């Protein structure tokens, strides 16, 4: 069964508004979660590393003021796309390390964001 | 960020055929993961590899951690229509840091 849950699965918002996506680890604590962005037929591109209790680490080229990440608890990280524009429309996916037997990451179901 | 070289980019095969795909990197990795992604869904973990030379199976899927630690292979035997999807490899240079780099993906189409 799923070990990482993401919500909402689909969201449509108007240009200029903000939208929040949640990522939850189920039945385990995750001090670190990861946010990816994926364009159609392309690979996953890491946007940022979400650290519980501290600031997120952003990859080069990712605007931290536009993609706000909050890792408020050991089971929840949120990504807020602020002042969304149509070019922000994409598939956003989070992941978390369950690390039961080794270095492994599990992904959420993904969230389709459409900005109109 | 770094991306791994994954090949082939796409495959069209007949049902029942075996499939092979691979990932290569210029860096030495400590962990290799293989995922399958269906359209509109998040990637699902298929196999995890933690040691050079390791060969691990998951049903009809078999993956190997290359001896050089710079490559990994995924084989699917006796393909079926539900094997259709995009397969990604992911590698990490850390044992604990969880910083994974992804391959460019292999799109698999199985013709009934």
Image (cartoon, coloured by chain):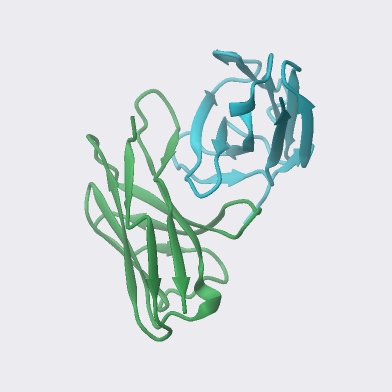
Corner quadrant of residue B20:
top right
> Which residue reaches farthest front?
B112
Residue A84 % position (x, y): 43, 79
Number of numbered labels in the structure image: 0
Viewed as shown, does residue B101 lie left or right of A16?
right
**Camera-nearest residue between B90 and B96:** B90
Q: In this view, does A106 lie above or below B77?
A: below
Q: In this view, does B57 lie above or below B33?
A: above
Viewed as shown, does residue B61 lie left or right of A104?
right
Q: The cyan chain is which one?
A: B
Identify the residue shown where x is 34% and y is 72%: A19
> Which residue reaches farthest bottom?
A16
Residue A8 % position (x, y): 32, 58
Residue B110 % position (x, y): 71, 29
Residue B40 % position (x, y): 51, 50
Viewed as shown, does residue A108 lie left or right of A43?
left
Q: In this view, does B85 lie above or below B18?
A: below
Corner quadrant of residue A101:
top left
Viewed as shown, does residue A112 lie left or right of B64?
left
Corner quadrant of residue B29:
top right
**Camera-nearest residue between A91 and A101:** A91
Q: Which chain is green?
A: A
Identify the residue shown where x is 55% and y is 40%: B37
**Camera-nearest residue between A42 and A96:** A42
Q: In which quarter of the image is the C terminus of chain B?
A: top right
Q: In which quarter of the image is the N terminus of chain B?
A: bottom right
Identify the residue shown where x is 66% and y is 43%: B103
**Camera-nearest residue between B76 and B101:** B76
């Amino acid at each position: 069964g799923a070990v990482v849950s993401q919500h909402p699965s689909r969201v449509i918002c108007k240009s200029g508004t903000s939208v929040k996506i949640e990522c939850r680890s189920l039945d385990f604590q995750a001090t670190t979660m990861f946010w990816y962005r994926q364009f159609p037929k392309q690979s996953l591109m890491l946007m940022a590393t979400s650290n519980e209790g501290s600031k997120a680490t952003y990859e080069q080229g990712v605007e931290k003021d536009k993609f706000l990440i909050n890792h408020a608890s050991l089971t929840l990280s949120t990504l807020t796309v602020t002042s969304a524009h149509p070019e922000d429309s994409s598939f956003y996916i989070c992941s978390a390390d369950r690390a039961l037997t080794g270095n492994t990451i599990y992904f959420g179901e993904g969230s389709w964001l459409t900005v109109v | 960020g770094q991306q791994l070289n994954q090949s082939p980019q796409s495959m069209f095969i007949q049902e029942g055929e075996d499939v092979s795909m691979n990932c290569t990197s210029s860096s030495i990795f400590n962990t290799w993961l293989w995922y399958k992604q269906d359209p509109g869904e998040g990637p699902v973990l298929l196999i995890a590899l933690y040691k050079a030379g390791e060969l691990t199976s998951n049903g009809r899927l078999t993956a190997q951690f290359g001896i050089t630690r710079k490559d990994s292979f995924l084989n699917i035997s006796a393909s079926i229509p539900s094997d259709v999807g995009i397969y990604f490899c992911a590698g990490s240079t850390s044992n604990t840091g969880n910083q994974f780099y992804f391959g460019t993906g292999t799109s698999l189409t199985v013709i009934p």
